Image (cartoon, grey):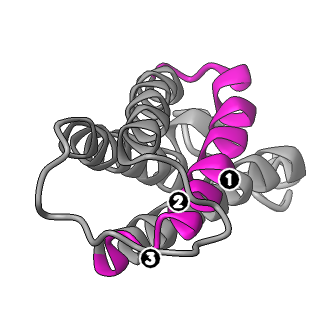
Amino acid sequence: MASGATRPGWADADPRPWHGPTSGTTVFAAVLMIFGGAMALFEGIAAIAEDDLFLATRHYVFEFSLTGWGWVHLILGIVLIVAGCAVLTGALWARFFGVSVAGLGAFANFLWVPYYPLWALALVAINIFIVWALCTGMHREAEGGRVA
């Protein structure tokens, strides 16, 4: 009779099972993916339109045309938004795909720094937070632990 009450974890059992896609870090990553993807999408549209907003650099190692960089950011933004929506549904493949796309986004925005430094560095930080949040959510799910 008393043996059931003394088992560890018996008293604080939660009727709702914990699952990685519903964790706070995974939802945080999905929201950041959608937000960061939208920012990259707008960045790509502005670059394709050859707006006067961007700085023309000379003798840059990764010198593409502004339109070329615009297409890179536009495609990365669309893929990041789609991956963020898929992470919200709880798809495991979306989390792995999201880590890859966010890593590519951070790299692309790092190379974009000479064109628009503040925006590029903000997107690098957002993409790094996305990778961190997705990896943290996967790590906690793999441990089988519950986050308080």
How would you classify the magenta stretch by its main secondary structure? helix
Between 12 and 90, the one lying in front of the other is 90
Name the residue tied to disc 1. 103
Upstream in sequence: badge 3 or badge 1: 1
Locate residue 82, reporting x and y percent. 44, 21
Residue range corresponding to the magenta coloring? 89-118
Q: CA distance from mark 2 to mark 1?
A: 7 Å
Checking the image for residue 127, the label placed there is 2
Q: Quadrant of the N terminus?
A: top right
Disc 1 is placed on an element classified as: helix
Locate residue 70, reporting x and y percent. 37, 40
In the image, what residue type sits under mark 1?
Answer: Gly
In the image, what residue type sits under mark 3?
Answer: Pro
Tell me if label 2 and label 1 are in contact, CB under 8 Å. Answer: yes
Between 54 and 128, the one lying in front of the other is 54
Above or below, 106 against 34 in this view is: below
Residue 93 within the segment the image draws in magenta: yes
In the image, what residue type sits under mark 2?
Answer: Asn
Say which residue appears at 36% left-offset and 79% top-offset.
117
Name the residue tied to disc 3. 114
Q: CA distance from mark 3 to mark 1?
A: 19 Å
Residue 108 within the segment the image draws in magenta: yes
Say which residue appears at 67% left-offset and 34% top-offset.
95
